[in-house]
């Protein structure tokens, strides 16, 4: 079996998984076991949670990492550097930015790095790749590891070259003596095939921004060539000898229970292996089409619960079942705000269920041999899957190895990996490698949808157009994105329900995180309400926002995007079709201006232009940051204008892209991105912030174009026409 066939994509500067045959999972790893695993080279241990590198909030995210080291790396005798990370690459480009961070501090070129990501037998434990935390949380620890490694190498070079520390220079993996360039030693020569454990007795100093030669510079993605040429391997591309493809019997609706099953006809299909054990009914075959044909021959009956809610009645249901609220922010009193307001505004905003709809469906390949399971999974949480599979098989986690190849999109949906448990169980039952690749219909059915939600806002302004009241209540979305960065003396923010972890009976199917969970819903409601007040006050929407925030970072992104766009002040609605919105997510401040056109006969909305300014602290890779912004803006068109899961009880009515619309190339507007320089702040999240304003900025632009205000996402043509008609009447 070749390296590529084993799901290890590329060796140099690419994304691979070591051959490591150790059985440790990474959940608890001793130094001795780790050294056995990684082999020769210089190994540097780094302590977890250095308060000088992380804020207390982000340090909290690191709980559970190995106590001996946070991030770690290996320098081989050939001079190549292997970086190990429990994070995964799913198209967000973090493999490249993490490589830049390591290369910068270590003093090597990015081309000399190999990235090992998401392998539970080789990488330190990680909670998962989500929340735009890779750069914010793992990045500082990786930089610290690389900086410490650099200092250890300098110490070793001093001994080898007989020179004082202040005379040693590090460049491209070579240590030399200043003033005598003939005296050099390479990283590889210092490693020399030896295993050297060295803990630095002093604190390594990270490079300052002015010293950067790798970080802060545009760099093409390390995975680009492989993905463009098709050489990159995903879980569905991997083949093992004797592998079977599985198709599983599925219920017609969530909550349905299997009553009877007859597999006799499927048993007659040549080469088919039929499994019917403990509720797991599947047909396996070397040919996936034959497996699907045999599955169709199974006769089964289900008891389907009577539907009690659908996509029209869900919002009343959510308000009835929502738990008591939790105060997120409180300033002054609501009563004082009411007394100080000359005009009050009370609005309700609605947001439906949204699917993740990644290009790659959930896929897993499992092999069970000698009591140990090895799985190749399209997942955002390899260590979480390791535990889930171990529980399902009744084995210890160290007897389960998860390897994460490239992942074809996740957006939060691949934090759940039911296909991995299915593949592992079937592999053990059949004694052969088994691949489970969900069909598109299964992907839609078993998706953990972004939860539907309701937001109720009461606000008020005084006679001078100053906001005096902000009474904000969000139901079932969560608090993320409800931050009060406007200067309001009387503000109350309450969240009813902790995001997708609502109690049973709240949602008719599973829900979960969807790119910037809750922030899209909350930003839509907040920024729409701000625009409503600006219109009543007769003020320009940009001026109204600037008037109500003294936050320098928020003012910075608003002023930057306005300058770039060429904003000309006007009161609302101006008829120009221009909208403004701003938000805060993952430590990053963001502001958008959008221009739209609206067909008043069809209700079709065309987004013509979107400008976005983002303050994300130090920008590790400007090209990567812009790609993320562009991707967020494009994906945001979907939840703003079209994406809405239709259902009847537990039955999902949208099972493919013929009825569920995602953004098309023809929808993509002219996109302009502005990176606001803020080198005083460590790198912040970049994978989600630019999506949070898209619903709001388009809604505000539609209002500016038509005078019609929309309160329900997505803003479909029918809803646009209804709003225009309501305004005219």
Image (cartoon, helix red, strand yellow):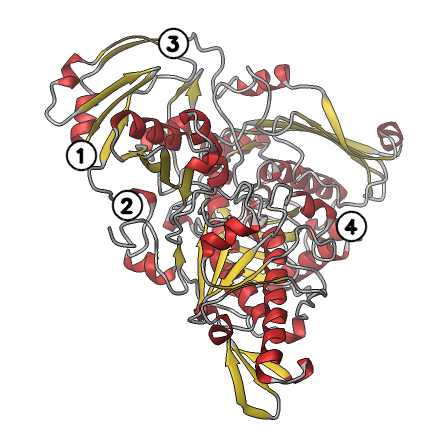
Q: Secondary structure at mark 2?
A: loop
In this rendering, the label closer to the viewer, 3 or 1 = 1
Q: Which residue is mark 3?
A: 304
Q: Which residue is mark 1?
A: 286
Per the rendering, the mark at residue 238 is 2
* Residue 177 in picture, x, y percent from top left: 60, 87
> Disc 3 versus disc 2: distance between alpha carbons?
37 Å
Of mark 3 and mark 1, the one earlier in the sequence is 1
Q: Secondary structure at mark 1?
A: loop
Of mark 2 and mark 1, the one earlier in the sequence is 2
Q: Nearer the viewer, residue 246 or 83?
A: 83
Horizontal placement of 718 versus 271: left or right?
A: right
Horizontal placement of 454 versus 82: left or right?
A: right
Q: Which residue is mark 4?
A: 549
- Count of number-bearing discs: 4
Q: Are marks 1 and 4 in contact (CB under 8 Å)?
A: no
Please indicate, yes or no, whether residue 371 appears anywhere in the rendered image. Answer: yes
Q: Are marks 3 and 2 in contact (CB under 8 Å)?
A: no
> Disc 2 versus disc 1: distance between alpha carbons?
14 Å
Residue found 60% across the figure and 36% down from its top: 518
Q: Quadrant of residue 346?
A: top right
Residue found 64% across the figure and 28% down from its top: 498
* Residue 479 in picture, x, y percent from top left: 67, 34
- Height in image: 640 above or below 334? below
* Residue 524 in picture, x, y percent from top left: 61, 38
In this rendering, the label closer to the viewer, 3 or 4 = 3
In this rendering, the label closer to the viewer, 1 or 4 = 1
> Disc 1 versus disc 4: distance between alpha carbons?
62 Å
Per the rendering, the mark at residue 245 is none
């Amino acid at each position: 079996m070749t390296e590529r066939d084993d799901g290890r994509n590329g060796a140099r500067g690419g994304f691979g998984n070591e051959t490591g045959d150790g059985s440790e999972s990474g959940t608890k790893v001793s130094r001795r076991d780790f050294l056995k695993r990684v082999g020769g080279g210089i190994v540097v241990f780094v302590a977890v949670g250095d308060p000088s590198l992380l804020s207390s909030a982000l340090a909290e995210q690191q709980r559970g990492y190995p106590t001996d080291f946070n991030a770690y790396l290996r320098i081989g005798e050939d001079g190549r550097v292997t970086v190990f990370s429990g994070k995964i690459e799913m198209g967000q480009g973090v493999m490249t930015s993490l490589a830049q961070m390591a290369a910068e501090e270590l003093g090597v070129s990015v081309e000399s790095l190999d990235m090992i990501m998401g392998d539970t037998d080789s990488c330190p434990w990680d909670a998962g790749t989500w929340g735009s935390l890779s750069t914010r949380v793992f990045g500082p620890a990786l930089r610290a590891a690389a900086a410490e490694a650099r200092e250890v190498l300098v110490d070793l070079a001093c001994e080898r070259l007989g020179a004082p520390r202040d005379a040693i220079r590090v460049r491209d993996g070579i240590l030399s003596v200043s003033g005598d360039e003939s005296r050099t030693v390479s990283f590889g020569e210092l490693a020399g095939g030896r295993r050297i454990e060295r803990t630095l007795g002093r604190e390594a100093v990270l490079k300052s921004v002015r010293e950067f030669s790798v970080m802060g510079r545009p760099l093409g993605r390390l995975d680009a060539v492989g993905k463009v040429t098709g050489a990159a391997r995903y879980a569905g591309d991997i083949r093992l000898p004797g592998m079977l493809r599985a198709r599983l019997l599925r219920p017609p609706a969530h909550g349905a229970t299997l009553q009877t099953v007859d597999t006799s006809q499927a048993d007659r299909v040549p080469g088919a292996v039929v499994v019917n054990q403990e509720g797991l009914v599947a047909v396996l075959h070397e040919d996936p089409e034959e497996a699907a044909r045999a599955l169709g021959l199974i006769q089964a009956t289900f008891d389907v619960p009577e539907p009690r809610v659908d996509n029209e009645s869900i919002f009343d249901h959510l308000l009835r079942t929502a738990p008591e609220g939790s105060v997120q922010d409180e300033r002054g009193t609501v009563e004082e705000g009411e007394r100080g307001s000359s005009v009050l505004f009370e609005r309700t905003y609605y947001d439906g269920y949204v699917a993740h709809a990644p290009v790659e469906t959930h896929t897993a390949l499992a092999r069970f041999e000698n009591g140990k399971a090895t799985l190749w999974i399209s997942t955002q949480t390899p260590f979480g899957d390791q535990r889930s599979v171990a529980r399902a098989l009744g084995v210890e986690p160290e007897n389960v190895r998860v390897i994460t190849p490239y992942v074809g999109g996740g957006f939060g949906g691949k934090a759940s990996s039911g296909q991995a448990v299915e593949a592992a169980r079937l592999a053990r039952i059949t004694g052969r490698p088994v691949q489970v690749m969900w069909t598109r219909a299964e992907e839609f059915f078993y998706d953990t949808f972004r939860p539907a939600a309701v937001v109720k806002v009461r606000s008020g302004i005084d006679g001078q157009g100053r906001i005096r009241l902000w009474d904000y209540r969000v139901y079932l979305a969560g608090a993320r994105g409800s931050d009060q960065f406007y200067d309001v003396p009387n503000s109350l923010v309450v969240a009813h329900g902790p995001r997708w972890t609502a109690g049973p009976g709240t949602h008719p199917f599973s829900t979960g995180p969807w790119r910037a969970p809750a922030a899209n819903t909350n930003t839509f409601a907040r920024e729409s309400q701000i625009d409503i007040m600006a219109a009543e006050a007769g003020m320009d929407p940009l001026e109204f926002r600037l008037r109500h925030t003294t936050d320098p970072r928020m003012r910075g992104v608003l002023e930057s995007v306005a300058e770039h766009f060429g904003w000309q002040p006007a009161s609302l609605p101006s008829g120009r079709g221009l909208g403004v919105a701003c938000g805060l997510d993952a430590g990053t401040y963001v502001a958008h201006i959008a221009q739209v056109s609206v067909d008043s006969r069809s209700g079709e909305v065309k987004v013509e232009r979107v400008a976005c300014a983002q303050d994300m602290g130090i920008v590790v890779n400007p090209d990567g940051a812009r790609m993320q912004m562009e991707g967020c803006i494009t994906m945001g068109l979907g939840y703003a204008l079209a994406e809405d899961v239709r259902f009847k009880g537990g039955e999902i009515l949208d099972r493919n892209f013929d009825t569920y619309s995602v953004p098309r190339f023809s929808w993509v507007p002219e996109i302009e991105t502005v990176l606001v320089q803020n080198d005083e702040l460590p790198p912040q999240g970049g994978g989600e912030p630019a999506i949070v304003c898209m619903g709001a900025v388009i809604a505000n632009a539609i209002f500016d174009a038509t005078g019609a205000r929309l309160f329900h996402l997505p803003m479909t043509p029918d809803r646009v026409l209804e709003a225009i008609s309501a305004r005219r009447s």
